[in-house]
Image (cartoon, rainbow, N blue to C red):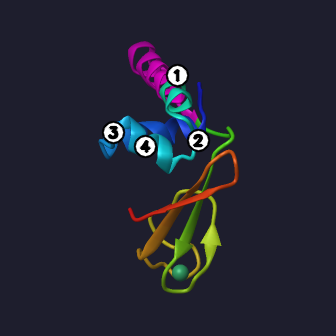
Amino acid sequence: MILKVEELESLRLKDLLQKDQTEAAKMMSVSQSTFHRILTEARRKVVDALVNGKAIRVYGGDYTLRNLCRDCRSEWGDFAERCPSCGSTNIFYRGRGRHGRGVDQNL
Ligand SMILES: [Zn+2]
């Protein structure tokens, strides 16, 4: 089972950080209806995996994540707890939507 990056992001914003749908959609630079569609599909996949014992892999999709280290200013794409260059946890998270508009936020 493949969970797209934007599907995981929709779950993170809505269910983990408990943003309302308007704010979450804005943070991902998508319309509310698109956000709702992404979120619904994400929840269906996660529930399917839990109920049927399937593994979930996060991969692909139109949404990419960038991380920026505040200490050494290096940038990378994959999620990490620490900066791969200097090991700092002072990380700035940046989501980028499908229209190329950057959305910045603090974790
Ligand atoms: Zn660093």
The residue wearing badge 2 is 5
Task: Residue at 52%, 27% (x, y): give it.
Answer: 33
Task: Give the distance between the C-alpha atoms of the residues marked 2 and 4, in whole angstroms.
Answer: 15 Å
Q: Which mark is residue 41?
A: 1
Q: Amino acid at mark 2?
A: Val
Closest to the observer, 85 or 24: 24
User: Residue 103: where, in percent of width, then height?
Assistant: 54, 58
Task: Residue at 64%, 45% (x, y): give it.
Answer: 63
Q: Is 2 inside the magenta-drawn segment? A: no
Q: Are marks 3 and 1 in contact (CB under 8 Å)?
A: no
User: Residue 83: where, in percent of width, then height?
Assistant: 52, 73
Circle 3 or circle 1, nearest the eye: 3
Q: Are marks 4 and 3 in contact (CB under 8 Å)?
A: yes
Q: Are marks 3 and 2 in contact (CB under 8 Å)?
A: no
User: Which badge, 2 or 4, is on the more N-terminal residue?
Assistant: 2
Q: Residue furthest top?
A: 52
Closest to the observer, 94 or 83: 94
Tell me which secondary structure the magenta stretch mostly adopts. Answer: helix
Q: In the drawing, does residue 51 fall left or right of residue 8? A: left
The residue wearing badge 4 is 24
The residue wearing badge 3 is 20
Residue range of the region highlighted in magenta in the rendering: 38-57
- Is disc 1 placed on a helix, strand or loop? helix
